Amino acid sequence: MLFFNNRFSLWIVGVLCTALTGVMLISCQMGSAMSKSKSLSSYDEQVKQLLSQMTLDEKIGQMTQAEQDAIKDLNDIETYFLGSILSGGNSDPKEGNSLAAWTDMYDRLQKHALNTRLGIPILYGVDAVHGHSNVIGAVIFPHNIGLGCTRNPSIVEKAARITAEEVRATGINWTFAPCVTVPQDERWGRTYEGFSEDPNVVKVLGQAAVRGFQGSSLNNPLSILACAKHFVGDGGTTTGTGTNAANISITLDQGDTRVDEATLRRIHLPGYITTVQAGVGSIMPSYNSWNGLKCSANKYLLTQVLNQEIGFQGFLISDYNAIAQITQDYKDAIAISINAGMDMAMEPSKYRDFFTTLKELVNEGKVPMSRIDDAVTRILRVKFAMGLMDKNRSVLADRNLHKKFGSPGHRQAAREAVRQSLVLLKNQNKVLPVSKKTTRIHVAGNSADDIGNQCGGWTIAWQGQSGNVTTGGTTILSAIKNTVSSNTNVTYSVDGTGAEGASMGIVVIGERPYAEFMGDSDKLTIPDQDVETFNNMKKAGIPLVVVLISGRPIMINDILDRSESVIAAWLPGTEGQGVADVLFGDYKPTGKLSFTWPRSVSQIPINIGDKDYDPLFKYGYGLSY
């Protein structure tokens, strides 16, 4: 890896972006990014005054994030001056996942922070990546892969704005989103977290999401802090270290992105430039490495490129236990990461160890006090910008916001997002749209009447789960029944039997929920149970419409050839009515593929611009009526 002095680094950025990107001039965007982030540095005088009053313990506390259900004693919030708390994918209130339980938990923890000597409130982080998805009754939007197919920054911004309002209803003030990864290999289990394989789509929609989460001002009571992730190159790994759910031959999660700097900048960096321009207040460095060096340990990327070159003035938060992956010696790992530019450490259960170890490192001179002060300055800038330091304003939950949580208006916005995200792949003999007066429609498939499958991972539980016990909403089957005329008979079987005599069939099949490395796969095939369902429907000799539920393109050649129509519905979330809107023509499909659809797994990785590009469906493909 090459390390440049600042002047040469700035020069090479201009050369690379002019020669390689065509559509993006980083040198111009840098100036805009820097001027935008001045809104955070404008709080530095207030930060300086507070910083001068803080002890070393209080400073290190601001840099420490614990997981709520791993806090050994709630008094630790005061003892260690914790600056932040999170709930990971499975870290729920002990009372359950209700709106009231989440709100009560937030208030309980925040009150402990307010009891500290300086009364600095905590930042509370959750993975609200497609709605406030840990909480029962929240509106769940399509995952990013579906939003990418809309090509509509307005709908992405609106989804993020509604998510922010529902997060604030529980008092929580920070989401670990948007994910501005640019996935290059669909075998990766986090593909659905990316808007597109095309960085030009990612940079526009990522910026829109930040605008939605943070609003016109972080100080707005309905705004939450956004976090662009995972910096940088998480979608370009060639090998990985994750442990897969199945014994498969490829692991991509938390892997190594082996590309030169020009490629890293061209593909993986643009989304961070535009989110910084939008004023994003936090960024999460990635588990992955770049050419063998962990991003969480890479001072060139974190300090020189992100902070100095792009002009980011918020703070960096490590991923879940990521610092410990840098090297086997935990103390050395902390020193490396903090000195590289990490400002806050996500140490779910080892928060005490992190606190005491970092304090030792400072006292031993291995982490300079200037680096501690810089990290705490960055964190406090954001807290001041969010209004958390305003003594005239409550930082506890505003329970009046409960009235709009999961409201019809919020669900209507999600329904619109679903409509726009669907991609029509095939429509032989114009079988779609279906007439609402069709005599009999037989619906089948494991995902036809399953909110859990519709939502996918990061829904109530980290991995998501099949079934309708996860959260509210409308299944696709229910949506179909809601849409047809009173004279239409809608019948249903999970396995596709009993379709004989129907006018047509709708088969809803695809992937089951997964998240992160548990979704890494070298097969990408439709489950055998779903293939059997399709075959049972085919025996009835009726026209078949296939609705695919998946977090990425999957292998569908045989089903594609034997069906009249195929719709890629991705992971649409709770509002299945949006799928019915397209099926019955209340909305003509407008979605365009944001990922190339391969003919076979052997073609992967395949991306727009590749030599000998010959996929099943090209990037940008999508039919209409």
Image (spheres, rainbow, N blue to C red):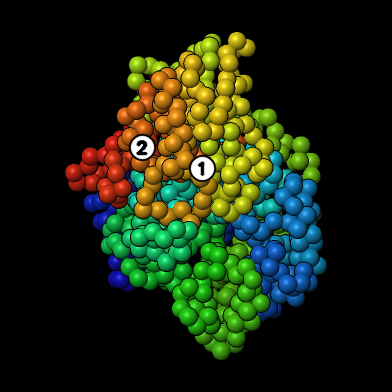
Specify the quadrant of the image occupied by residue 130.
Answer: top right
Of residues 548 and 340, which is closer to you in this image?
A: 548
Q: Residue at x 41, y 70 (%)?
A: 294
Q: Is residue 443 left or right of residue 568?
A: right
Q: Nearer the viewer, mark 2 or mark 1?
A: 2
Q: Which residue is mark 1?
A: 143
Q: Position of residue 555 (x, y in %)?
A: 35, 41
Q: Residue at x 70, y 64 (%)?
A: 69
First in residue order: circle 2 vs circle 1:
1
Of residues 107 and 566, which is closer to you in this image?
A: 566
What mark, if any, has residue 23 been given in the picture?
Answer: none
Q: Position of residue 89 (x, y in %)?
A: 61, 56
SS for callout 2: loop
Disc 1 marks which amino acid? His
Of residues 130 and 529, which is closer to you in this image?
A: 529
Estimate the spatial distance between the alpha carbons at disc 2 and disc 1, rounded to whole Å: 21 Å
Disc 2 marks which amino acid? Ile
Report the quarter where the C terminus lies: top left
SS for callout 1: loop
Compared to 269, does 329 lie above or below? Answer: below
Q: Which residue is mark 2?
A: 556
Other residues around mark 2 within 10 Å, as few (<14) / some (14–19) / many (≥20): many
Q: Position of residue 584 (x, y in %)?
A: 50, 18
Report the quarter where the N terminus lies: bottom left
Q: Position of residue 109 (x, y in %)?
A: 76, 61
Q: Residue at x 49, y 70 (%)?
A: 341
